[in-house]
Amino acid sequence: MAEKQIELNSVEIAAAVFGNGDHNIRRLESEFGITAVSRGTMLKLCGEPAGVNAAARAVEGMLLLMESHTPLETQTVNYCISLARDGEEQRIRELTEDFVAVTAKGRPIRPKTLGQKEYLQAIRTHAITFGVGPAGTGKTYLAVAMAVKAFKAKDVSRIILTRPAVEAGEKLGFLPGDLQQKVDPYLRPLYDGLFDMLGEETFARLLEKQVIEVAPLAYMRGRTLDDSFIILDEAQNTTPEQMKMFLTRMGNGSRIVVTGDVTQIDLPDKSRSGLVDALRVLKGIEGIAQVRFSEKDVVRHRLVQQIVKAYEQAASGKVAAPAGHYKQI
């Protein structure tokens, strides 16, 4: 058995590390099989040496986050635990040193995982970036944040958002309203990011001036898009022909971000996904980055991460229904 004591610098820091109702240290006990006791500003960890050391590293990661004024939310604590398990808690510092923008309400936007940091760096340094991974990894939100940042810095003159309207077969004529109203249901996730970054009034004004343009993918055909930041969301639902058409719209001074999840293809013939095809065809081309997220990068509710992992294991045949887990009613 091993024992380690960690003296925290203040009551405020201790309260944040321990969590509401000692929730965070209960998580440490559960994850590392140790016993954690808190008294005042002191945290004592007891158990097998490997577990105690890993828990201490997780606390170190939490303290690094607090140094950069990052709140210890459930997701950030879980990520510290995940990195500590792999002995990489010091890499938390890389997240605190990165910065994207400030929302309309003054909240700073930073990467919350190393996968997100890699994604942001790829967008900064490549003309075309593919962000591929499960739901909840921040692919779309961070792309929108980078688009707004580029627009405010005058690196681009407009933002173009597009998404395949698979459910309507790209034939939106039967829906009521003008083009904007027809495509709104499909582009709501993109709107949410823009509202957060710009505020609703500024967004509406830029949309009216066509500085921000929203259109279904089919309306990109025949255009050349210069000096623009272009985001293609839900790209797994494009066909190879649509993807080629979209990528070849790129003009001078433009940047493209393509996001999607290859496990959520809604096309009738899933083997014909334009995203899957593009990742294969364009691999290794200079100026094009491919960033792949995993369940560790999920920044929504902790159960989302577990759900994603469970489905991945089921798809690979590595999991079976646990014996005795169900009871007959």
Image (spheres, grey):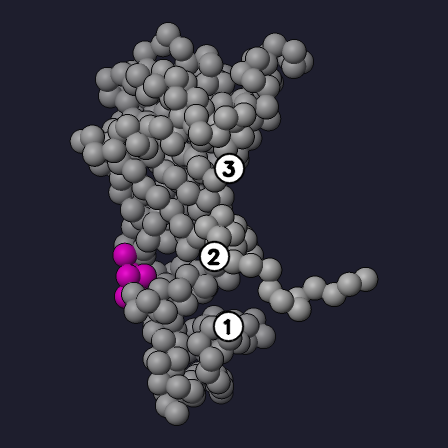
Residue 27 painted magenta = no
What residue is pinned by disc 1?
27
Kind of element beneath mark 3: loop
Labels 2 and 1: the sequence-earlier one: 1
The residue at the point 60 percent across, 60 percent down is 321
Q: Residue at x 31, y 48 (%)?
A: 117
**Given the image, on which type of amino acid does mark 1 rest?**
Arg
In this view, the residue in front, 172 or 23, is 172
Judged from the image, the secondary structure of the residue bearing numbered disc 2 is loop
Whether the residues at callouts 3 and 1 have beta carbons within 8 Å, the answer is no
The foreground one among 174 and 229 is 174
Q: Residue at x 26, y 42 (%)?
A: 121
Residues drawn in magenta: 89-94
Q: Earlier in the sequence, mark 2 or mark 3?
A: 3
Q: Amino acid at mark 2?
A: Lys
**What's the distance in space between the residues labelled 2 and 3, CA to CA?**
20 Å
Asked if one can make out residue 247 in the rendered structure from this viewpoint, the answer is yes
Query: Could you tell me the amino acid type at mark 3?
Result: Gln
Vertical placement of 272 versus 100: above or below?
above
Image check: 240 left or right of 176?
left
Where in the figure is residue 138, as x and y percent of width and height?
A: 44, 44
Q: For mark 3, what is the residue? A: 264
Q: Quadrant of residue 147?
A: top left
* Relative height, residue 140 to residue 22 (above, below): above
Compared with residue 286, is residue 111 higher up or lower down, i.e. above or below? below
For label 2, the residue is 318
Q: Position of residue 116 (x, y in %)?
A: 35, 47
**Mark nearer the N terminus (3 vs 1):** 1
Where is residue 106 drawn, in percent x and y? Answer: 44, 45
